[in-house]
Image (spheres, helix red, strand yellow):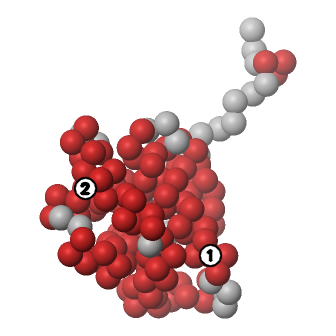
Amino acid sequence: MEGNDVKEMQSSFSLIYARKAELAERFYVHLFELLPEVEPLFGGDFAKQKEMFSAMLTYCLKGVANNQSMTHARDSLSLTHGRYNLGRQETALAGKAVMAALEDVLGNDLTREQVSVWEQAIAGVMDLLHAEPEPEPKPDAERQP
């Protein structure tokens, strides 16, 4: 992301963070409208799932701004979601669900520029679901000379 894009995203982050629980709620409403076949994968208790969604969204989007946590986010997302064999179509629809939730929750509080930047950031996070986790580094004793 460009420096101006990061600033634009950060300018709206506090609005989004303050309403992250509502955002998580709306995300799942939209996700199940777009991909009803995935609803059974979640069981019945969404409280923990919504909490994890909010935490990972926050973590990933902070990582987009500073690039320091993206490797960890990629590894975590690909390990957590890899067992579902999600294709590009499913992750694109999940990204649409996130954007629809943002629009539901924040409506006119986001500028066009902010919407555009969030779309880019969310697309980047969705791409992480298809990334291969990096192998854990070997301890010094196991490394070849």
Look at the picture and state if 27 lies above or below 143.
below
Extreme residue in the left direction:
112
Looking at this view, is 27 or 32 the one in front? 27
**Residue 82 vs residue 12: left or right?**
right
Residue at figure coordinates x 54%, y 50% from the top left:
73
Report x, y in % for residue 23.
44, 76
Marks 1 and 2 sit apart, C-alpha to C-alpha, by 26 Å
User: What is the quadrant of the N terminus in the image?
Assistant: top left
| Amino acid at pointer 1 | Gln
Q: Secondary structure at mark 1?
A: helix
Report x, y in % for residue 101.
36, 78
Look at the picture and state if 11 lies above or below 90.
above
Residue at figure coordinates x 61%, y 71% from the top left:
51
Residue at figure coordinates x 57%, y 62% from the top left:
55
User: What is the quadrant of the C terminus in the image?
Assistant: top right
Q: Quadrant of residue 30?
A: bottom left
Q: Name the mark on residue 49.
A: 1
Q: Badge 1, how many Cα within 10 Å: few under 14, some, many 20+? A: some
Q: Name the mark on residue 117.
A: 2
Look at the picture and state if 18 lies above or below 101.
above
In this rendering, the count of numbered labels is: 2
Report x, y in % for residue 33.
40, 90
Q: Secondary structure at mark 2?
A: helix
Camera sees residue 128: no
Residue at figure coordinates x 62%, y 75% from the top left:
49
- Are circles 1 and 2 on residues that touch, CB within 8 Å? no
Looking at this view, is 106 or 143 the one in front? 106
